[in-house]
Image (cartoon, rainbow, N blue to C red):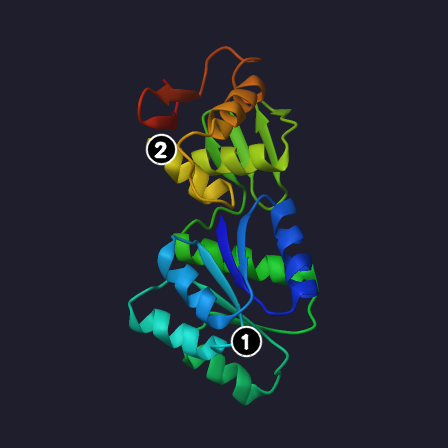
Amino acid sequence: MRILLVEDDHRQAQFIVRGLQQEGACVDHVADGESGLHQALAAPYDLFVFDLMLPHRDGISMIRELRGRGITTPILVLSARNSVDDRVHGLRAGGDDYLVKPFAFSELLARIYALYRRSTGMMEPAGIEVGELRLDPQRRKAWRCGQQLELQPKEFALLEYLLRHAGRVVSKTMIMEHVWDYNFDPQTNVVEARVSRLRDKVDRPFDRPLIHTIRGIGYVLEER
């Protein structure tokens, strides 16, 4: 999952970024509304998390601009304003959910997952499965043939991305954009290295591979 966080409170932003990265999310952070709007328009995201009180441009203005341009990416609003009128104002502007500060990180995470599942139509409570491979996004665990796989956070995020696109070829650029929080560098081999490590855990101990290389294009996870 790729998330854009627009939050001017540096301490709170770092707390959110660290927590989401530990969950395997790719997070970009900017600290003002004008930069946030520019970033939201410049790159594909799965979810936006916007504070309302921001320098240069407020969160409501950002939301209205994005919705006016036809961008339907889910938006979670963060705000210290907790009146009913404030919440209604944020939702009517185009926000999909509203979370009042201070909040527990567990609640933030639950709301992010709920918005993501709703927007993608992926409501699978028991996890994602392809053949003998199963992944539980909520518990951050994966198994093959009933054997739990010991995955690092980025390995889990990569496997989840491949599973959610099972049977479809995903390019190196697509993987970089959704699993890593920096722009694609054609000279880097980080994707190849991480896929190789993932294969060591997902494929090599078992009878047949599930992760396949499509030379010159990317990768596909499927049974053959």
Percent position (x, y) of residue 12? 68, 64
Say which element carries label 1: loop
Percent position (x, y) of residue 170? 36, 33
In the image, taking residue 109 as reference, residue 74 lies left or right, namely left
Percent position (x, y) of residue 205? 58, 13
Residue extending furthest toward the top: 207
In this picture, is 48 found above or below 57?
A: above
- Identify which residue is drawn at 30% across, 73% down: 68
Q: Which quadrant is the C terminus positioned in? A: top left
The reply to whether residue 73 is in sight is no
Say which element carries label 2: strand
Which residue is the site of mark 1? Answer: 54
In this picture, is 68 found above or below 10?
A: below
- Nearer-N-terminus badge (2/1): 1
- Mark 1, residues whose alpha carbon is within 10 Å: few (<14), some, or many (≥20)? some
Q: Quadrant of residue 55?
A: bottom right
The reply to whether residue 178 is in sight is yes
- Identify which residue is drawn at 44% across, 58% down: 118
Q: Quadrant of residue 109?
A: bottom right
In this picture, is 9 found above or below 116?
A: below
Percent position (x, y) of residue 191? 48, 29
Q: Amino acid at mark 1?
A: Leu
Q: Quadrant of residue 165?
A: top left
Q: Amino acid at mark 2?
A: Ser
Foreground of the two, 16 or 147: 16
Which numbered dot is residue 171? Answer: 2
Mark 2 and mark 1: span between their CA atoms? 36 Å
Q: Are marks 2 and 1 in contact (CB under 8 Å)?
A: no
Q: Is label 2 or label 1 in front?
A: 1
- Identify which residue is drawn at 58% across, 43% down: 24
- Identify which residue is drawn at 37% across, 27% down: 220
